[in-house]
Image: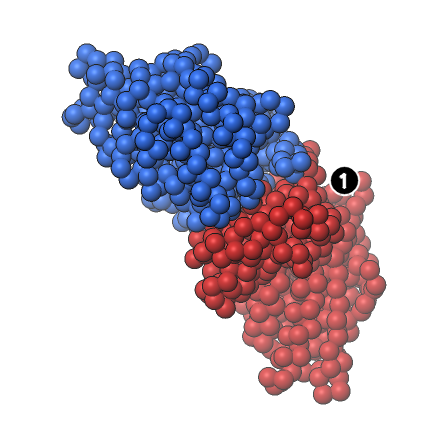
Chain colours: A blue, B red
Amino acid sequence: MENVAVKGFKAAGVASGLKKRGKKDLGLIFSQVPASVAGVFTSNLVRAAPVLLDMERIKSGSCQAIIVNSGNANCCTGGQGMRDAGTMARLAASELGISEELVLVASTGVIGEPLPMEKIEAAVPDLVRSLQPEGISDLAMSIMTTDTVPKMVSGQGLLEDKTFTVIGVAKGAGMIRPDMATMLCFVCTDVEAAPEILKEALVKAADRSFNRITIDGDTSTNDTVLVMANGMSGAVIQSLAHKNIFQKVLDEIFLALAKQLVRGGEGVTKLVEIVVRGALSDSDARKVADTVAHSPLVKTAFFGEDANWGRIMGAVGRAGAEVDPDNIDVYFDDVQMVKTGMGCGKAVEAEATKVLMKPEFVVTIDLNMGRGSDSMFTCDFSVDYVRINADYRS
Amino acid sequence: MENVAVKGFKAAGVASGLKKRGKKDLGLIFSQVPASVAGVFTSNLVRAAPVLLDMERIKSGSCQAIIVNSGNANCCTGGQGMRDAGTMARLAASELGISEELVLVASTGVIGEPLPMEKIEAAVPDLVRSLQPEGISDLAMSIMTTDTVPKMVSGQGLLEDKTFTVIGVAKGAGMIRPDMATMLCFVCTDVEAAPEILKEALVKAADRSFNRITIDGDTSTNDTVLVMANGMSGAVIQSLAHKNIFQKVLDEIFLALAKQLVRGGEGVTKLVEIVVRGALSDSDARKVADTVAHSPLVKTAFFGEDANWGRIMGAVGRAGAEVDPDNIDVYFDDVQMVKTGMGCGKAVEAEATKVLMKPEFVVTIDLNMGRGSDSMFTCDFSVDYVRINADYRS
């Protein structure tokens, strides 16, 4: 992971003792000047305290710092949880010398245990001292829970001869599903943009990336995506053409992070794109892609490298979309396994199995009815997924 | 498993070579006289050939025999599959000396491979010769796929001094979900009932049992429940009181079979009832029960015997029902783990873990908002579930 700096941003990640074995568990992002900010949050009705705090505070459109911890979700923690989230922001603000209203908060980890505030309080001075322009990779480490690798992607764009940089970090190996896919994602950019322009770009990019991935169908109580734009590059978004340029950079970063999240998912050995075309509508295509992408039987067959297309047909048939079973074609990459609803025989099966042995491949389902299409990224369901999740709190 | 006979019924199960190692894979149920019949079938739009055949043929309300094979689903097999299903019925009818219109067909196993008809044809004479009054347990063996044990339950009732007997067999360890839970279930009774009375009782009993269980959320292309009533006990359903007596017997058999299906599910180590009460409506309660019962994170925590109530809260919050997160109580059997949305602390956790170590327990979620309630039976999600399903076709 290369270290990229975005003008005017510093970041840090330290170990406060929330996680065992001296692992980094407390992170900070800081902008030299107050930045425009936009966010999207979990659609779960059970929301963690920091999510509730951010949803209120972000209305101002302005933010200068984000403090985040892993190892504890500060969720289902009642009034004390809300006070603790506020205190986290206040501790960071006080050490940074800024208004606490300019600090947002995020948490990830076990639900239902009070935050050990004394550990966080003791670590904040060290956290602020550790801030550095290339500190974003330390932050990426500090937000990991069951993730096996930190996820960080950067990109650049050009607006009227001024170059802007965007960097995104994300975590979230389980509890990933459409509607609010990533557990935590923070994006820093030195472009200048009004909060409402940021929000529009953020929602579009999330819909094209995080809302198209699934690992296990569960939705977190803490999911948070925040974008800060401090304008320090001198590049300013002030036309539709500019918006499009920024959107393209943001889309690419989000899609790359989304694929990293699936690839790094709990126990994942394969990244599989489910492409549905020929549906009567895009919404029908989405239903089919979503059902196939979530089917435990399909996902365990991927893990077993078993070209069991019957399970795909079974998932297509129960998706709630209009389909004609005798008209469906299925491909594994370029290998056609199903033609007009029937298997293409043992001959192609060996070819299909070769595709399944790859770490990444595409399953295309053509309903041959209309022009609706959609796609999803999913993964296999492995023995290790169960092991990791059975033992998570131990 | 005790062997019970129902007046006028014989059954058999033999090995035709569809399954390996000489396992039973072809079954037959035969009634001395044509019986009333009712059925419910998969809601999947991709339906196996025998399902399509039965759905048409059952309209007559009359049936004298059911022939069933395991090891091959005869699904996604096109016109040949339809002809093969018809041939299975014809072979049985011819050997039994009855009209082929009185024979229904069921299949279970791998999707997308043509039925090896020569094996079935060769085995039918032996199958018919093997028919015997206590043969239902052989039939129960012959329909198993990944099931670890055969499932059979019987019961009796009294109508105006006449005793009637009901016996049900079922199979289905994976691809179990609400809307059409059991893969295959056959019920024989010697009560006399019109087909429409049978259908009404069947739908009610299925809704209270098979539609309340889940193992992995997938729905089969072959799900079939058939009830045959041949009237040979002399007991006749001819009043509302009689209907209620029959319903009670059928409900008990279906619920017992449904619980056996979950308990015998792929890799299952625990049977868990999810009870939701205090919802604004029964439909809200159903959404919550369904979402919790299907959550892979909740189910892996059950497997790990981890009292991770946070995952339950997460599932409740994303169920799409109206909930007030600060008002939710959660119990593991009698142990309260969550009160008004917050954990009850480490002290009760040891008690809760004791509950989780039991092979059967109840999770009660009280939303404390209204009078809506519902419940579901689910199971844990184990390492073996993945192993079994990754290797199924190998």
Considering only vertical position in the picture, is B7 above or below A34? Answer: below
Q: Locate the C terminus of chain B and report the quarter of the image it occupies.
A: top right
Say whether residue B192 is left or right of residue A327.
right
Q: Position of residue B339 (x, y in %)?
A: 56, 55
* Front position in the image: B283 or A50: A50
Say whether residue A236 is left or right of residue B206.
left
Q: Amino acid at mark 1?
A: Lys
Dividing the picture into quadrants, the one containing residue B335 is bottom right
Q: Secondary structure at mark 1?
A: loop
Say whether residue A357 is left or right of residue A323.
right
Badge 1: chain ID: B
At 75% across and 71% down in the image, what residue appears?
Answer: B155
Say whether residue B314 is left or right of residue B151.
left
Q: Position of residue B204 (x, y in %)?
A: 57, 69
- Say if residue B1 shows up in the picture: yes
Q: Residues within 10 Å of mark 1 (few under 14, many from 20)?
A: few
> What residue did someone put label 1 on?
B20
Q: Position of residue A234 (x, y in %)?
A: 21, 16
